[in-house]
Image (cartoon, rainbow, N blue to C red):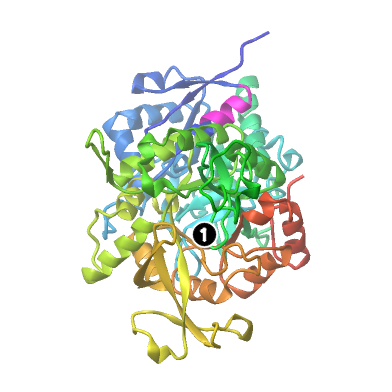
C-alpha cells in the first residue's frame, strides 16, 4: 500500500493550530512542521493556518524569511491551502494593523491575488463576523467533492470569524471559489486557481463539512486532480445568511474529591442544598457536595455530535490559582480538540499573576497563549475586564496598551477575545435614584422588583459574582469594545438557573450600545426561550447549560423550533 501524503504545516506560533493538526490527522494524514524556509521547497503540500492579526502574521513571515520562499512556492503553482489569514495574506495588502489606536497604510501581503483586504463597516453590521454562514460556489473543485454533492458549497454552513474581508473585483474574479454574504456585504469566502487554494472560513472548526473539505483537498493533492476546476453558472442575486448560534457552556471545577467535573449553579451556587446528592465517597462541606453533571471531554463530544455551534469551557474556580499550573483544565482542552471540531472558548484565570512559589510573573498574554496552544479558539475574560473598564474610564477613556484585552487582541486578533459580564439587577423606583453614569432600563410587568420597582440597572460583579462593583454592564461592554474585545458573553445572576428565559432588557441594553456580537446567557429553560431572545433582542447567539446537561431539552429540538419560527439555524444530519 502506498504511504499517504505528508502535510507540511506552517505554524508561525499564533493562535490555535492544534485543531488544524487534529483535523488533518483525523483525515488519516501525517504532519511535518515547517521550521525553516528551506523546507518549503521540499514540501508536497503546505497548509498555512493563519490565526491572529494580519500584521503579526506578515511580520513573522518576513522576520523568519518565509515570505520569499512562499512566494516562489506559490509562483510554481504547487499545492497550498491557506486558512483565514492564510488566505488574506495571499492578497496585495490589508488595512489591518496591530498598532493600538492607529490605522496606517495598507500592509503589504504576498501579492499572489489582486486586491486588498478591507474592514467590514461596523456602522452597518456587527463586527467581527462570527458564526456559521453559507458559501455560494463559483467553481466546481475536487476540494469540494464531499460537500454539496461536489457541485456547490452553499448547502452546508461553515464557520467564520473575521473583521476584514476580500471584496470581489474584476481582477480577482477568476480566483473566486466561493462567495459569502454578511448582512448585505458580499465577499470572497474561498479561492482557488490551479493548485493554490485558500479559505476565509475555518475548515477545522466547521464540523463534518469542514473535515470533508480537508479530505477532498488532500485526496485531490494525492491523486493530482486538485487543479481540475471548472466554472459554474452563478446567480448574482443569490445571498447567504449568518445563522443564529446555539452555544453550550460547561462550568468546570474540581469537586470535593478533587475530580474535574461539569457543574451548574443556581444563581451561581454550584452546591447541592444538602448532602443527599453528593457523589459517593466524595467529601462535602455539610451543605452538599459540588453538583456533578458529567465529565468535561465526554460532554463536549456529545454536544458536538448533537449539533452545538460552539462550546465554552468556563473554569469557575480559576481565580484561586494560576492557569499555568492548572494542568487538568489544559488537558481537557487538548483532549476535547481531538474530537470536537467546532469553536472552543475557555474562560477563567485569564489575567496576569505571580506564581506564589517561584515568584515568576506571568502576563495575561502568556496565560492566553497557553490556552490557545492547548486547543482554545477564543478566551473569555471576566473579572479582569471589569477592572480594565474601571481603569479605562478613570484615565478619561484612554488606553494604556497594557490591559489583558489589549495585549491579547493585538497578537491574536479581536475575534479571539470574549468578555464575560456577570451583572445583577439593582432595582430602583425611578431613574433619578441612580447615578447618571449607570444605564437604567424599564422593566415589563412580569419582571418588576420585589417592591414593584419598574426600573433597574445592572451592576457588574467580579470573582464569580462574589464582589459587586460600582459600574454597570453597558459601561463595561462599551469599554471592552474600545479596548479590543470582539464579543460579549452576557450573563445575568438573577436569571441564572431559573429557567424562566433570558433577560431581554439587559440583552437589548448592551447589544444596542456596542457593535460587536453579543451572546445571551443565563435563564434558558425551553426551546421557546431561544426563539424569544432572537426575535426580541439584537443578540447573535444564545447559550445554555443546565437544560442540556440534564437532557431536559435537546440541541436539535431547539434548532427545529427556531427554524419553524423563521430563525435560521445550522441543522446537521
Tally of numbered discs: 1
Camera-side residue of 378 and 303: 303
| Residue found 29% across the figure and 58% down from its top | 103
- On whether residue 225 falls in the magenta region, the answer is no
> Which stretch appears magenta?
21-28
Residue on which disc 1 sits? 268
Quarter of the image where one finds residue 451: bottom right
Whether residue 228 is visible here, answered yes or no, is no
Q: Is residue 27 magenta?
A: yes
Q: Which quarter of the figure is the N terminus placed in?
A: top right
Please, what is the dominant secondary structure of the magenta stretch? helix
Residue 363, quarter of picture: top left
Do we see residue 469 in this rendering? Answer: yes
Residue 508, position as x, y percentages in the image: 53, 75
What percent of the width, then of the height, locates residue 160?
54, 50
In the depicted structure, whether residue 297 falls above or below residue 28: below
Q: Residues within 10 Å of mark 1 (few under 14, many from 20)?
A: some
Q: Is residue 271 above or below residue 458?
A: above
Q: Residue at horizontal 34%, vertical 84%? A: 436
Q: Is residue 553 left or right of residue 224?
A: right
Q: Secondary structure at mark 1?
A: loop
Is residue 374 toward the left or the right of residue 242 in the image?
left
Q: Residue at x 49, y 76 (%)?
A: 509
Residue farthest along the front direction in this orientation: 286
Amino acid at each position: 500500500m502506498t504511504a499517504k501524503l505528508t502535510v507540511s504545516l506552517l505554524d508561525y506560533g499564533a493562535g490555535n493550530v492544534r485543531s488544524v493538526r487534529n483535523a488533518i490527522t483525523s483525515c488519516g494524514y501525517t504532519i511535518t512542521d515547517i521550521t525553516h524556509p528551506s523546507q518549503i521547497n521540499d514540501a508536497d503540500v503546505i497548509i498555512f493556518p493563519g490565526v491572529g492579526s494580519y500584521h503579526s502574521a506578515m511580520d513573522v513571515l518576513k522576520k523568519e524569511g518565509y515570505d520569499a520562499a512562499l512566494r516562489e512556492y506559490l509562483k510554481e503553482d504547487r499545492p497550498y491551502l491557506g486558512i483565514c489569514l492564510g488566505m488574506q495574506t495571499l492578497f496585495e495588502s490589508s488595512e489591518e494593523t496591530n498598532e493600538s489606536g492607529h490605522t496606517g497604510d495598507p500592509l503589504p501581503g504576498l501579492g499572489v491575488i489582486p486586491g486588498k483586504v478591507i474592514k467590514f463597516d461596523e456602522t452597518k453590521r456587527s463586527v467581527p463576523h462570527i458564526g456559521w454562514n453559507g458559501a455560494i460556489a463559483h467553481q466546481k473543485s475536487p476540494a469540494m467533492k464531499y460537500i454539496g454533492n461536489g457541485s456547490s458549497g452553499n448547502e452546508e454552513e461553515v464557520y467564520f470569524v473575521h473583521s476584514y474581508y476580500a471584496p470581489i473585483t474584476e481582477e480577482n474574479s477568476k480566483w473566486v471559489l466561493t462567495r459569502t454574504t454578511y448582512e448585505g456585504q458580499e465577499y470572497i469566502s474561498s479561492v482557488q486557481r490551479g493548485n493554490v487554494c485558500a479559505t476565509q472560513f475555518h475548515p477545522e472548526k466547521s464540523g463534518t463539512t469542514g473535515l470533508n473539505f480537508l479530505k477532498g483537498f488532500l485526496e485531490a493533492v494525492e491523486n493530482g486532480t486538485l487543479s481540475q476546476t471548472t466554472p459554474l453558472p452563478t446567480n448574482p442575486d443569490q445571498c447567504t445568511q449568518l445563522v443564529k448560534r446555539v452555544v453550550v457552556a460547561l462550568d468546570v471545577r474540581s469537586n470535593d474529591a478533587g475530580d474535574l467535573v461539569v457543574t451548574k449553579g443556581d444563581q451561581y451556587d454550584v452546591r447541592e442544598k444538602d448532602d443527599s446528592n453528593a457523589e459517593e465517597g466524595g467529601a462535602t462541606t455539610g451543605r452538599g457536595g459540588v453538583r456533578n453533571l458529567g465529565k468535561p471531554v465526554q460532554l463536549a463530544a456529545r454536544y458536538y455530535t448533537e449539533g452545538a455551534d460552539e462550546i465554552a469551557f468556563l473554569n469557575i474556580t480559576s481565580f484561586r490559582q494560576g492557569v499555568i499550573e492548572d494542568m487538568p483544565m489544559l488537558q481537557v482542552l487538548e483532549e476535547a480538540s481531538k474530537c470536537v471540531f467546532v469553536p472552543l472558548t475557555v474562560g477563567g484565570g485569564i489575567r496576569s499573576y505571580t506564581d506564589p512559589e517561584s515568584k515568576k510573573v506571568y502576563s495575561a498574554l502568556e496565560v492566553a497563549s497557553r490556552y490557545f496552544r492547548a486547543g482554545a479558539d477564543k478566551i473569555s475574560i471576566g473579572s479582569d475586564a471589569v477592572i480594565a473598564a474601571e481603569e479605562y474610564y478613570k484615565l478619561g477613556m484612554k488606553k494604556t496598551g497594557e490591559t489583558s484585552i489589549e495585549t491579547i487582541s493585538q497578537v491574536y486578533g479581536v475575534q479571539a477575545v470574549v468578555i464575560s459580564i456577570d451583572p445583577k439587577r439593582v432595582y430602583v423606583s425611578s431613574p433619578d435614584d441612580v447615578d447618571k453614569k449607570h444605564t437604567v432600563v424599564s422593566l415589563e410587568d412580569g419582571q418588576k422588583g420585589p417592591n414593584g420597582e419598574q426600573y433597574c440597572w445592572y451592576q457588574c460583579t467580579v470573582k464569580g459574582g462574589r464582589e459587586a462593583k460600582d459600574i454597570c454592564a453597558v459601561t463595561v461592554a462599551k469599554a471592552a469594545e474600545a479596548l479590543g474585545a470582539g464579543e460579549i458573553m452576557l450573563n445575568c445572576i438573577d436569571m441564572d438557573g431559573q429557567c424562566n428565559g433570558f433577560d431581554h432588557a439587559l440583552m437589548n441594553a448592551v447589544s444596542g450600545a456596542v457593535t460587536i456580537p453579543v451572546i445571551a446567557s443565563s435563564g434558558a429553560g425551553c426551546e421557546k426561550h431561544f426563539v424569544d431572545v432572537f426575535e426580541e433582542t439584537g443578540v447573535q447567539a444564545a447559550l445554555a447549560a443546565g437544560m442540556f446537561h440534564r437532557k431536559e431539552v435537546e440541541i436539535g429540538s431547539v434548532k427545529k423550533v427556531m427554524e419553524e419560527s423563521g430563525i435560521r439555524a445550522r441543522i446537521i444530519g
